[in-house]
Image (spheres, rainbow, N blue to C red):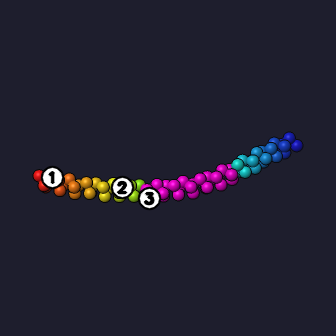
Amino acid sequence: MEHQYILDRLNAIDEKFDGKLDAILIQTTKTNGRVNGLESWRALVNKVLWGVLGIILTVAGFYLENYINKK
């Protein structure tokens, strides 16, 4: 009889952990989806910023070259 009580308690604890693990899995899946979206957005912003910086430096280079050649 005592063994059955211990087994029942262990099963109850196991079911409790299973419920918590399922909840953690659901939340982790939701969080990963949001993080992936943010990472994609950040990568796009970085590309745009580097492109703008490249254009600015190119224009500055042309002005500098023009300034040097006039002297």
* 10 sits to left or right of 35: right
- Classify 7 as above or below 65: above
Specify start and end residues of the magenta stretch as a single range.
21-45
Which residue is at a point 25% across and 54% down the rendered structure image? 60
Q: Secondary structure at mark 2?
A: helix
Disc 2 from disc 3: Cα separation: 10 Å
Outermost residue to the right: 1
Q: Nearer the viewer, residue 12 or 54?
A: 54
Residue 36 included in the magenta stretch of the image: yes
Q: Which residue is mark 3?
A: 44
* 58 sits to left or right of 16: left
| Mark 3 or mark 1, earlier in chain | 3
- What residue type is disc 2 on? Trp
Q: Which mark is residue 50?
A: 2
Disc 2 from disc 1: Cα separation: 26 Å
Q: Nearer the viewer, residue 7 or 57?
A: 57
| Mark 2 or mark 3, earlier in chain | 3
The quarter of the picture where residue 57 lies is: bottom left
* 57 sits to left or right of 40: left
Which residue is at a point 39% across and 58% down the rendered structure image? 48
Residue 10 included in the magenta stretch of the image: no
The count of marks equals: 3
Q: Is residue 7 visible?
A: no
Q: Which residue is mark 1?
A: 68
- What residue type is disc 1 on? Ile
Please state the horizontal and vertical placement of residue 29, each as a whole percent of the image: 61, 55
Q: Secondary structure at mark 3?
A: helix
Which residue is at a point 78% across and 48% down the rendered structure image? 11
Of labels 2 and 1, the one closer to you: 1
Quarter holding the N terminus? top right
Category of crowding for the residue at label 3, using alpha-carbon neighbours closer than 10 angstroms: few (below 14), some (14–19), many (at least 20) = few
Disc 3 from disc 1: Cα separation: 36 Å
